[in-house]
Image: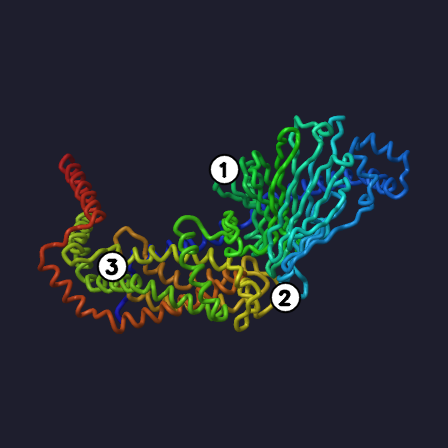
């Protein structure tokens, strides 16, 4: 059997592809370097919070006592600590009840104490896996807080989360309106207004004050503090953690995020339009009609050990000052409690779809204008697993002309190989001259040595776009196909009694199939690639490297994709399978080595084809190097 050599250009393509693959896998990997320091910091924060809670408990108890008994002595005592806001202690709401508003999509519970949402449940979605019976809870059991720090004119510093609001619920048409008022008098109050429309994830949220210009010290802005410890909602906490981020839009339409690792735990953007505490497939967003002039945004990773830290994923915090206008505060805002679904978010026309990580530049364009519309169309008619297969087939067919050019280039290089080898022997002692003559041969034969590499580079954006699209496709969540219960998570077929570093404690089947497919693809194509070009002097033994790559690539696929979503693994399996089929068809029916050889010989007899800019530049560099070498030898 004829010995096979490697096409250097194709190897460059493969190396680039797998280099990008490694980069994609590791770029969002959490940095665990300062875990011990973080834990100590968190423990200190918890201790301080408990101490503060105890300090406020006495005030809260006294407030309830006043509301219940009307004790004037206790009221006088409260006035010393609460000032005019001791009036709120005389209201029935100080007993500490809740008000519930809900529509077909969300259920919200608002507490009298603090006036903020203490429970937000999504009615249409279940946690972890379909059939679990547990609805997705974005807010519950004190995992969230909302607070305004009030500086009073009589030098008190109060926190609204410790004070009691008076609830009033009304209806405006089909909308439910809940007014929560923190009163400093009969007509002086701070109001939170919640407006819930039917069949909507968006909740109107207004903050305004009335006749508080003499009660509050308006020389200082009101600091709005919002915090959320995100609950785990998906099967794989490590996978969910990777896509749980604090996102924000600022200064017009600029968009950024706080990664929550290393030095990127805190940002201080200005003129902020919205702040999104995004989980993998769900999100809580605070939007404002009047941009927040300043902000302090913080993200902390709560998953130090995946075996122990199984309830919460990230701790998000946001602090934004609310400015006074004529001594009063009036902000029109909104809350979004719902899925991180591109189409749902885009429908609000507020740039909220930016929180979906579709990639930057051309990668994002491919996802927005090709992948999302195409997959959305297919999945509206057929099951999601079948839609992925059809989607992959259409993408590969569209890319087949590029695949054809790549294989044609390999075939041409294979035909030229004997002559290139001959030039190598002829100019064995003069590598520069050998390169010059080789370039002349390419020019005469009408062959572009880069043609085998360029098609692979053109396909790279589509490959990267798929790595962004499938993990972000909300449609795949809890959709089953064959043995996969959830196409958005790993397709476990075997649960291991131990944990393998980098691999996990389970075996997923689709990554195995994808690894087998890429092994056979590389095995089948490596022969032609190796025969396309001879070993270059001074270069590494690429043929040997290719032999290793044939086995390394499937292993990488097994390791990295084992914990990735089954939809992405299915896409890669079908993609490699189709590429093998296209390759067989092209080689059998479209590429004839004898015809290619005859065409190349005919091209040699014609006037040399005009060199491309790259080839011409390379030729000039070689000639200059050759002239310098000759001058040095003459000088010696």
Q: Which of the two residues, 290 or 412, is positioned nearer the viewer here?
A: 290
- The answer to whether residue 516 of the structure is visible from this angle is no
x%, y% of residue 525? 33, 66
For the image shown, how many numbered marks are present on the structure? 3
Q: Secondary structure at mark 2?
A: strand
Q: Alpha-carbon distance for marks 2 and 3? A: 49 Å
Residue at mark 3 = 534
Residue at mark 1 = 251
x%, y% of residue 378? 45, 67
Relative to 30, is 379 on the left or the right? left
Q: Secondary structure at mark 1?
A: loop
Circle on res. 497: 2
Q: Secondary structure at mark 3?
A: loop
At 86% across and 35% down in the image, what residue appears? 75
- The answer to whether residue 626 of the structure is visible from this angle is yes
Which circle, 2 or 1, is nearer the viewer? Answer: 1
Q: Which of the two residues, 500 or 445, is positioned nearer the viewer here?
A: 445
């Amino acid at each position: 059997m004829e010995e096979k050599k490697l096409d250097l250009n194709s190897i460059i393509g493969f190396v680039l592809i797998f280099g990008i693959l490694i980069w994609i896998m590791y770029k969002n990997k959490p940095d665990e370097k300062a875990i011990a320091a973080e834990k100590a910091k968190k423990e200190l924060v918890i201790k301080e919070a408990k101490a503060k809670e105890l300090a406020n408990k006495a005030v809260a108890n006294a407030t309830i006592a006043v509301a219940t008994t009307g004790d004037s002595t206790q009221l006088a005592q409260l006035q010393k600590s609460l000032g005019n806001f001791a009036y709120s202690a005389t209201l029935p709401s100080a007993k500490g009840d809740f008000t519930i508003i809900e529509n077909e999509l969300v259920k919200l519970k608002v507490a009298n104490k603090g006036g903020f949402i203490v429970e937000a449940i999504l009615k249409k979605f279940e946690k972890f896996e379909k059939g679990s019976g547990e609805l997705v809870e974005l807010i519950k059991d004190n995992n969230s807080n909302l607070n305004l720090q009030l500086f009073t004119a009589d030098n008190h510093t109060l926190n609204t989360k410790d004070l009691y609001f008076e609830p009033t619920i009304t209806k405006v048409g089909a909308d439910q309106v809940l007014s929560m008022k923190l009163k400093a008098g009969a007509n002086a109050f701070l109001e939170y207004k919640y407006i819930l429309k039917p069949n909507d994830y968006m909740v109107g949220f207004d903050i305004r004050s009335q006749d508080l210009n003499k009660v509050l010290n308006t020389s200082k802005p009101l600091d709005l503090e919002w915090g959320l410890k995100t609950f785990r909602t998906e099967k794989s906490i490590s996978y969910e953690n990777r896509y749980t981020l604090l996102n924000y839009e600022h200064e017009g339409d600029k968009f950024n995020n706080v990664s929550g690792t290393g030095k990127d735990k805190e940002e201080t953007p200005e003129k902020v339009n919205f702040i999104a505490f995004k989980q993998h497939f769900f999100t809580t967003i605070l939007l404002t009609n009047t941009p927040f002039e300043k902000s302090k945004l913080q993200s902390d990773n709560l998953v130090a050990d995946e075996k122990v830290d199984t309830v919460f994923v990230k701790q998000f915090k946001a602090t934004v000052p609310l400015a006074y206008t004529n001594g009063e505060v009036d902000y029109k805002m909104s809350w979004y409690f719902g899925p991180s679904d591109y189409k749902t978010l885009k429908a609000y026309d507020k740039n909220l779809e930016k929180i979906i990580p579709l990639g930057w530049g051309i990668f994002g364009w491919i996802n927005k204008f090709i992948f999302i519309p195409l997959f959305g169309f297919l999945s509206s008619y057929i099951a999601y697993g079948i839609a992925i297969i059809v989607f992959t087939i259409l993408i590969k067919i569209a890319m087949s002309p590029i695949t054809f050019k790549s294989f044609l280039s390999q075939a041409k290089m294979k035909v030229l190989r004997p002559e290139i080898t001959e030039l190598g022997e002829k100019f064995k002692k003069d590598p520069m001259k050998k390169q010059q003559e080789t370039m002349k041969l390419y020019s005469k034969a009408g062959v572009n040595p880069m043609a085998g590499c360029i098609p692979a580079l053109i396909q790279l954006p589509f490959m990267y776009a798929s790595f962004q699209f499938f993990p972000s496709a909300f449609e795949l969540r809890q959709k089953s196909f064959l043995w996969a219960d959830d196409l958005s998570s790993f397709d476990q077929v075997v649960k291991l009694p131990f944990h393998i570093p980098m691999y996990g404690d389970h075996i997923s089947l689709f990554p195995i199939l994808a690894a087998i497919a890429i092994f056979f693809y590389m095995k089948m194509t490596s022969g032609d690639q190796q025969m396309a070009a001879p070993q270059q002097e001074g270069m590494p033994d690429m043929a040997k490297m290719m032999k290793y790559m044939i086995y390394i690539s499937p292993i990488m696929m097994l390791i990295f994709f084992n914990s990735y979503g089954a939809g992405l693994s299915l896409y890669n399996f079908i993609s490699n399978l189709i590429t093998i089929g296209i390759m067989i068809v092209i080689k059998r029916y479209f590429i004839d080595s004898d015809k290619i050889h005859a065409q190349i010989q005919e091209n040699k007899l014609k006037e040399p084809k005009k060199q491309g800019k790259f080839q011409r530049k390379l030729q000039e560099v070689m000639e200059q190097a050759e002239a310098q070498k000759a001058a040095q030898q003459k000088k010696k």
